[in-house]
Image (tube, helix red, strand yellow):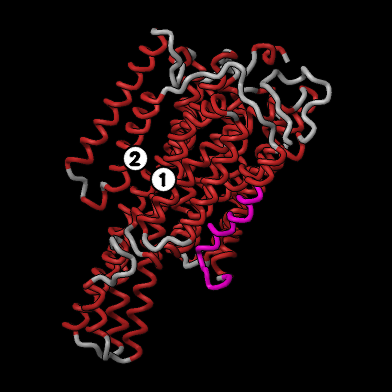
Amino acid sequence: MTETLTSREPGTADAGYRWRWVALFVILAGEIMDMLDALITNIAAPTIRAELGGSAATIQWLAAGYTLSMAVGLITGGRLGDLYGRKRMFVIGAAGFTLGSLLCGVAVSPGMLIGSRAMQGLFGALMLPQGIGMIKQMFSAKEMGAAFGLFGPVMGLSSVGGPVLAGWLIDADLFGTGWRMIFLINLPLGLAAVLAGLKFLPAGRAEHATRLDLPGAALASLAAGLLIYPLVQGREHDWPLWTFLMMAASLAVWGLFAWYEVRVQRAGGDPLIVPSLFRKRGFSGGLVVGLVFFTGMAGSTLVLALFFQLGLGFSPLKAGLAQIPWSAGVIIGFGVAQAVRRFGRKVIHAGTAIMAAGIAGTYATLQYAGIDVTAWQLVPALTVTGLGMGMLMAPFFDTVLAGVEPEETGSAGGTLTAVQQLGSALGAAVLGTIFFGLLGGHVAAAADDGAPALRRDLAAASVPAPQQDRIVDGLRACGHDRATAKDAVAVPASCHRLQDEIGTAAPAVQKAVAQAGEHSAKAGFSDAIKITLWVEVGMLGLTFLAAFLLPMHPRPEEEMA
């Protein structure tokens, strides 16, 4: 039978829990599943859309649906473990996550896939928060550092391996599954986590379990949904009035949520988020920093993955490999941050500045190399970007949570992690919307720029001037309509007309039109992402300023070090 432990402070037992190291690897398996699934759809999204159809919003929802449901669930996930047992909630979460992966793998429509992604996020939010509590429950103070120290390498390797694994699985097309294998691969890992969890995780629950604030959770979920949904869908509907009304309603519901939480605390209840946390400048500032930073970070990784495949024509595997320098830089940045941790908040500021320099370097590389840029040319800028990101993230959570009182730790940790996931959902919504909003116009503009060269090629092939005009105008319209298509599978009417115009033309004419179309598409994607990169630089500037709200050092004694 599995040993039972009551919640205790680390270090109060000499031996600790007998199966603690095995249990730790079970917990890490859950972390790996989450890290992989948070990253893989950035690589797989173009392939998924090409097969299942759907609009550009489908690509955004594949990321935002997962992280939004994760954010909502994380607020209550830890509390459920306190109430009903961390082992039980971990196993239920792992089982539900695995079932959600299966449903993703057999999805037959964009709606089914997005719904299954949301299911993954909700059960992942039930599974992940239990790990920290169980580690504190199982390990002595002497072993605690080593246990938590394994999270960094595991998360780093997952961030490197996730995009590469996704690209390889899609290109390999194992058993004819294509992109579906990126979800089906979770089945053996999830089943192993469930069985090992039942066998090796410690039973028991917190000694001072608190009641769950269900009305607070419902208000937070509603407010988040009212914000994310119109941001993703608004562009495709030309921003009707209801999108702005929903966003305004989101602000009102957030205000109602804050009022309700204060009321619960004053009545002697247990609020979902302890209001006293927001009187701490370091914590409130940390929420602002986290929201802005993770919004920009998640959005930029999404549009970069789309640019690699849709703009540069990389295969999924090559697109995954192209992101290795970013992930490797993050791992190096974590190490650098540990070496200079005595500088406190300055490390976060330095990381933000270095990451902004890396993003600006990416822009400069695209500007210099043009549409023929290679993955190798982007290595320096992406490595610098990752280096800054690692330096920023390494001290961030410790700095924000250091000033929190012991009785506020659970609420603070859950809130900060939820804000991280909410920022990721906002990133997919906001930067994805900016990128796709720019794309059509820039593809059309690139077609206009290339029109003189196309006319020369058509004239050399003896195409009459009136037909040249029809072909040039048709190519512009087709490029714009493809870039803004609401269904990737359906061919726009303008493209059908262009094909009819050149269908019986000489091979030289067809080749000239195909080359001009490819050039305008690549140039349009390049111009759209360059503007999006500057938006990310601006968000990092806001992150830099917001970081002044954080304390100089996590703990006062470090100021004397």
In-image side of 545 versus 499 (left or right): right
| The label number, if any, that marks residue 353 in the structure image | none
x, y (%) of residue 438?
Answer: 31, 53
Q: Earlier in the sequence, mark 2 or mark 1?
A: 1
Q: Quadrant of residue 25?
A: top right
Residue 311 in sight: no
Q: Residue at x 60, y 59 (%)?
A: 165
Residue 334 in sight: yes
Please tell me how crowded label 2 is: few (under 14), some (14-19), or many (20+) other residues with Cα within 10 Å.
many
| The label number, if any, that marks residue 228 in the structure image | 2
Q: Which residue is mark 1?
A: 64
Which amino acid type is shown beneath numbered disc 1? Answer: Ala
Q: Quadrant of the N terminus?
A: top right
In-image side of 95 versus 17 (left or right): left
x, y (%) of residue 248?
Answer: 24, 31
Q: Quadrant of residue 265?
A: top left
Q: Nearer the viewer, residue 521 or 230?
A: 230
Please determine whether, in this image, residue 403 is positioned above or below residue 435: above
Span colored in magenta: 174-193
Determine the secondary structure under disc 1. helix
Please determine whether, in this image, residue 130 is positioned above or below residue 557: below
| 185 drawn magenta | yes
Please determine whether, in this image, residue 151 is positioned above or below residue 161: above
CB under 8 Å between discs 2 and 1: yes
